[in-house]
């Protein structure tokens, strides 16, 4: 069974072909990130326009890389939410049209759930990817950490899960992006904060961990604490504009703030993941979403969880891609779920788990 996955929920236009929900045959990602950097974040209209320009060539590349023609493809899976409305529309309308033209079943995929399914990819013909040795087993604890989500979910089986907790305000990725802005680092903030943190002292500053529900998160207080810390460090009041902080902070102060913030933000997630692991004794733990590309997250998790419980997906499969969408599409098909109507499948920008 070969499924073509299409992803366009934010600034990445991506397509991939996955066989049987485990073998990655192609993975093509075109990002409009360079166009957004000067605005310090993704501009929805620019993202949507770039999707229009590249989506068909990206899909064709994915078919070519997988040595497939349309005859080889059994179904199309496309992200229908959550994400930016204009961006989602391009992917969904393209997938609907292709499903009608080529007469293929079409599956609308939940992007956040898709991230989890990057963990089910265990082999590939592509170079440069470090694949997991095996698929996760159930019950499975999923640590979902992205630019839009911070959640812990317990899966009893495919499509049978319950949310244990989630963020009450900002997502962890959003906190990385905002702290990067304070430190004058480029968007996206996660990789740039992580890079700067390598040179910093993780214990120089003591930042707060929010006190919320047992498995819930809150990152807005941490972000404000970083802002106040930076203002205090340069001897200014809390009225001092955040946009001018980076030029006044020394290189050492910036690196120490990045390292102290990263440690505490990741610790917040890992503390609760450990608690959930002890309470629910899952057979496996997976990490999912853009922040799953954090080496610090992997380091801290490996320190508190037994080796046998956790395996990490390749860094490239953590940020948005079509492979995870195709993988989940295979499981929709395998479990005989009814395909969507290609004439009516809509988008759901606020879709939750
Ligand atoms: O999953 P994703 O690509 O898009 C969403 O679905 O949101 O996640 C993007 C988020 C951004 O906030 C980015 O700063 C963060 O993932 N991110 C990281 C790292 N790489 C990406 N955060 C921390 N450390 C990283 N290495
Ligand atoms: Zn994502």
Image: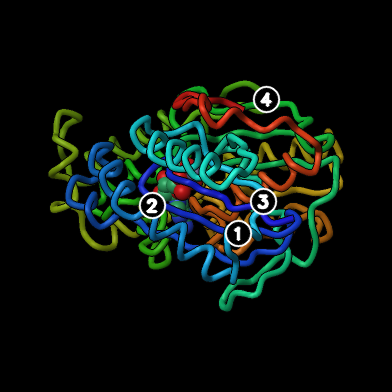
Q: Residue at x 46, y 57 (%)?
A: 59
Q: Residue at x 13, y 53 (%)?
A: 247
Judge depth for marks 1 and 4 and give the one in front.
1
- Estimate how packed mark 3 is, as few (under 14), some (14 to 19) or many (20 or more) residues with alpha carbons within 10 Å: many
Q: Secondary structure at mark 4?
A: loop
Label annotation for residue 173: none
Q: Measure the alpha-carbon separation of dots 1 and 4.
A: 39 Å
Q: Measure the alpha-carbon separation of dots 1 and 2.
A: 15 Å
Earlier-in-chain disc, 1 versus 3 = 1
Q: Which quadrant would the C terminus be assigned to in this image?
A: top right
167 over 62 or under it: above or below? above
Q: Position of residue 252 (x, y in %)?
A: 29, 62
Earlier-in-chain disc, 2 versus 4 = 2
Q: Which residue is under mark 3?
A: 327
Earlier-in-chain disc, 1 versus 4 = 1
Q: Position of residue 92 (x, y in %)?
A: 46, 37
Q: Is residue 38 visible?
A: yes
Q: Secondary structure at mark 1?
A: strand
**Residue 240: quarter of image:** top left
Label annotation for residue 17: 1
Q: Which residue is under mark 2?
A: 55
């Amino acid at each position: 069974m070969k499924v073509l996955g299409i992803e366009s929920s934010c600034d990445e236009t991506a397509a991939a072909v996955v066989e049987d929900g485990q073998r990655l045959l192609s993975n093509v990602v075109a990002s409009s990130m360079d166009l957004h950097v000067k605005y310090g974040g993704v501009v929805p209209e620019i993202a949507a326009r770039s999707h229009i320009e590249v989506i068909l060539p990206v899909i064709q590349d994915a078919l070519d890389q997988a040595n497939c023609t349309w005859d080889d493809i059994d179904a199309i899976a496309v992200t229908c939410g959550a994400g930016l409305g204009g961006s989602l529309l391009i992917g969904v309308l393209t997938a609907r049209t292709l499903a009608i033209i080529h007469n293929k079943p079409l599956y609308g995929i939940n992007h956040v759930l898709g991230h989890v399914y990057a963990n089910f990819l265990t082999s590939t013909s592509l170079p440069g990817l470090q694949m997991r040795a095996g698929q996760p087993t159930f019950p499975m604890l999923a640590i979902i950490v992205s630019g839009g989500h911070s959640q812990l979910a317990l899966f009893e089986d495919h499509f049978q899960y319950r949310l244990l907790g989630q963020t009450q305000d900002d997502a962890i990725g959003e906190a990385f992006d905002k702290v990067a802005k304070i430190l004058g680092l480029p968007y996206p903030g996660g990789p740039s904060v992580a890079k700067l943190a390598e040179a910093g002292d993780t214990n120089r500053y003591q930042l707060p961990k929010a006190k919320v529900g047992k498995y819930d998160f809150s990152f807005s207080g941490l972000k404000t604490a970083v802002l106040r810390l930076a203002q205090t460090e340069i001897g200014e009041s809390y009225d001092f504009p955040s946009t001018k902080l980076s030029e006044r902070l020394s290189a050492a102060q910036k690196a120490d703030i990045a390292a102290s913030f990263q440690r505490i933000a990741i610790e917040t997630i890992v503390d609760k993941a450990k608690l959930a692991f002890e309470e629910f004794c899952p057979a496996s733990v997976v990490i999912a979403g853009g922040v799953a590309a954090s080496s610090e997250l992997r380091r801290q998790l490996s320190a508190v969880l037994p080796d046998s419980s956790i395996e990490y997906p390749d860094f490239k499969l953590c940020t948005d891609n079509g492979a995870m969408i195709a993988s989940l599409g295979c499981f929709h098909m395998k479990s005989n779920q009814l395909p969507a109507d290609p004439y009516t499948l809509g988008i759901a920008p606020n879709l939750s788990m």
